Image: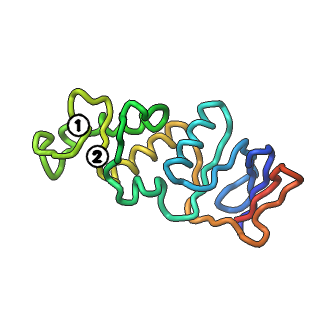
Amino acid sequence: MRSFLATLTVMSIATAGPAWGAPRGYDIVVYGGTSGGISAALQAARLGRSVILIEPGKHLGGMTTGGLGATDIGNKRAIGGISREFYQRLRAYYQDNANWKYEKPAEFKGTGQSPKEDAAWTFEPHVADQIYKNLIRDHQIPFVLGERLDLTKGVQNDGSRINAVTM
């Protein structure tokens, strides 16, 4: 079991152990590596906070990297911020013809590869995984896979402040 020590009201951690090295504090702990968790960690890093991302499963990205290769969007102009940046990075990836392994761009019947679009809305899950990992690496966000919160003594708090979480 790993123990993480909180240092801020949001969730902050430090840990000691062979996989972690010397104890280190973080301003924010994001528990859950879904698209929303990744976005939260990215925003925290962009705001100058130290952050770590903990995913209880074995993969980052939730449904986006787990097989959902199309996005159901009514009004594409309503998608902004980090979400839009993700879809724009998808489009940039597919602009390189070398990345089309199974069909040609002209044969593709999905949405979002049009020159009129600034983003791609249909994608391969492994590409989404690569983009998320690049974003995390670019922002130097450490992440941990396969760690679950201990449900009996997993959260130590002082009033509304979380002091530690135990995995």
Image spot of residue 18 (x, y percent): 68, 62
Where is mark 1, residue-wise?
Answer: 113
Front in this rendered view, residue 38 or 18 = 38
Image spot of residue 31 (x, y percent): 63, 55
Q: Going by the image, does 25 lie left or right of 77? A: right
Q: Going by the image, does 160 lie left or right of 41? A: right
- Occupied quadrant, residue 115: top left
Quarter in which the N terminus is drawn: bottom right
Per the image, label 2 sits on a secondary structure element best described as: loop
User: Could you say which disc has been placed on residue 122 in the image?
Assistant: 2
Question: Total label count?
Answer: 2
Image spot of residue 132 (x, y percent): 45, 45
- Occupied quadrant, residue 154: bottom right
Q: Type of residue at label 2? A: Thr
Q: Type of residue at label 1? A: Gln
- Judge the density around disc 2: few (<14), some (14-19), many (≥20) Cα neighbours within 10 Å: many
Write the residue at 26% across / 38% down: 112
- Judge the density around disc 1: few (<14), some (14-19), many (≥20) Cα neighbours within 10 Å: many
Write the residue at 30% across / 36% down: 91
Q: Which residue sits furthest bottom?
A: 152
User: Could you say which disc has been placed on residue 164 in the image?
Assistant: none
Query: Is the residue under label 2 in contact with that under label 1 (CB below 8 Å)?
Result: yes
